[in-house]
Structure formats: C-alpha cells, structure tokens
Image: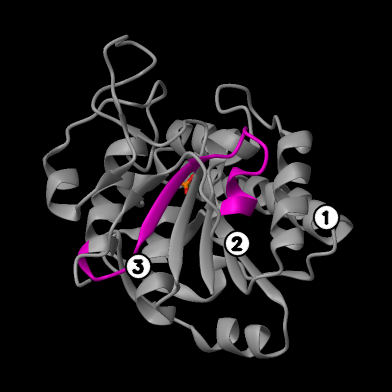
Amino acid sequence: MFIIKLGGSVITKKSKQECFRQNVMDNLAEEINKAGKEVILVHGAGSFGHILAKQYELNGGYKNNSQIKGFSLTHAMVQKLDSLVLNSLNDHGVPAVSIAPHSILKLDNHNLYEMNYKIFEDYLDKHFTPVTFGDVALDKKLGFSICSGDLLVKALAEHFKPEKAIFVLDEDGLYTSNPKTDENAEFIDSITPEKLKRLTTSLDDHADVTQGMKGKINTISELAGSGIDTVLLNGNKRERLYKTLIGEKTKITIVRGGKR
Ligand code: IP8
C-alpha cells in the first residue's frame, strides 16, 4: 500500500483563496486509478485553509472568541476542498471516502494525542480509498490548533507501514537550495534521512501556518528514519505519480528508509 499526500500547492493555487486546480487534480486521480494500488490519500489545505487559519491565528490555539468563528469557517473551507477532491476521484473511478481529521483525532500541543486508525482499516478492508486532509482539530493543551496533512501522513505511515509514502509537490523534488531563487540549486535524486536533516531549505514562497517545506523536511526525515521510503515528486508533470506507483523509473527524490 501507498500513502500519498497531495500537496495544497499542487491541487490549489496557494496565493489565491478558494482556487482549485481541477485539471491537475483530475490528472492525478486518473493516474491513481490507472495504477490500481491500495492507497490512503491525504491532501493539504492550500488556499482553502491556510489564508483563514493565518487570519484567525488558529495554530497558536484558543485566545479569544472570534477564533471560534475562524475555526468553523476554516473547517468549512477545507471540507469544501475535500468535496472537490472526492468528486474528482469518484469521477475517475477511485471509490473515495472522506475521513475528517477533527472527528477522529485529538492533538496535544500540536502533537498527535489520539487517533482512530480502525476506521481507515475498515474502509481499506472493503476496498475503499480513504481520503483525509489538513484540518482544524481539538488540542488538549491549546484548546484547538491545526492538524497538517504532513502530520497525518506520518501517523498513518507509522501505523500502516506502506511500501512508500509519496509527497506530491509543485516541485520536482528536493534541491540543495531554493530552485526558485538560486540558479545553482542542484536536484537531489536520492538522499539518506541523516543528510536530509542537515539540508536547510527555504523552498517556500508563502508563509505556511504549518511550516511549509521546513516542516515537511522534518516529517520526511522522521518517516525515513523509522524505515519508510519516502518519495517527493512533481504533481504537475504527467505520469510521475503513476510511474512511481507501478515502480517505473521517473524523476523523483527518494529518501531511503533508514533501516534498510
Ligand atoms: O496544508 C493545513 O494542512 P496542510 C490545514 O497539510 C489547515 O499543512 C486548516 C490550514
């Protein structure tokens, strides 16, 4: 099985509120269907979640009552994005079922405190494709905070031990520096978790409430460190996800699981 994170910067235009990239999502849905593998899908919030979450300062936890409205609005928006993702998957033959994080987990100071994995297992047993997403969530210490899709990938990968965890991005993979601002940036096709930890990066253009690329690199090095091969690939380029799923060579960065 594979755990795939569809990055918010791939399926939405991150700087423009509520801008869904239908064509990109449709292509990815078609490739997932064509590969015919067992997958759990996680998607980011992109411009549907990050703009509001930042505006209402949701990730810092409860401070005032106006945030209650912000929490609710942000949830409604990510749920809206999730419906668009589900429709695309269903239209392309992937029997998707949505599992909203806020109703199956609780955080404690941004870390996972408890989560219902059984619901994923039960849907997988019945050959559904579970879809979950970056969401607002209750937090034991902070009242509430943000549950990023990356945190979900990590938790699910540690539980289900997939063949690979795949991060679908709007970049080919990892570079030695930010390819958008540094013309000497070199592409990394394979890296160990130890070397990854040492790689400092400023790949993100937009300040993300969930730390963007820096947070992602931490998550990936932890994942790979626990033995799970992790792939980063470009979701805007046709067939890269498909080829990775069926084990064909294509342009990706692979972070080899530490225990191999
Ligand atoms: O896009 C963030 O999830 P991510 C979720 O996976 C919200 O980091 C609500 C901003």
The one of 101 and 216 positioned closer to us in this rendering: 216
Q: Which residue is mark 3?
A: 107
Position above or below: 37 against 35: below
Label 1 beta carbon less than 8 Å to ligand 1: no
Identify the element where label 3 is drawn.
Answer: strand
Label 2 beta carbon less than 8 Å to ligand 1: no
Camera sees residue 144: no
Q: CA distance from mark 1 to mark 2?
A: 24 Å
Identify the element where label 1 is drawn.
Answer: helix
Relative side of 56 to 257, left or right: right
Q: Which mark is residue 246?
A: 2
The one of 222 and 140 positioned closer to us in this rendering: 222
Which amino acid, by three-letter code, is at mark 2? Ile
Q: Return the residue found at the far right.
A: 91
| Protein image colouring | one colour
Relative side of 53 to 225, left or right: right
Which amino acid, by three-letter code, is at mark 3? Leu
Q: Which residue is mark 1?
A: 87
Which amino acid, by three-letter code, is at mark 1? Asn
Quadrant of residue 159 within the rendered picture: bottom left
**Which residue lies at the image location 40% right of the left edge and 71% below the top edge?**
157
The one of 112 and 173 positioned closer to us in this rendering: 173
The one of 235 and 74 positioned closer to us in this rendering: 235
Quadrant of residue 155 within the rendered picture: bottom left
Marks 2, 3: nearer the viewer? 2
**Which residue lies at the image location 77% right of the left edge and 48% below the top edge?**
84
Q: Return the residue found at the far front.
A: 249
Looking at marks 2 and 3 on the same chain, the residue that comes earlier in the sequence is marked by 3
Looking at marks 1 and 2 on the same chain, the residue that comes earlier in the sequence is marked by 1
Looking at marks 1 and 3 on the same chain, the residue that comes earlier in the sequence is marked by 1
Magenta stretch: give its range: 225-243
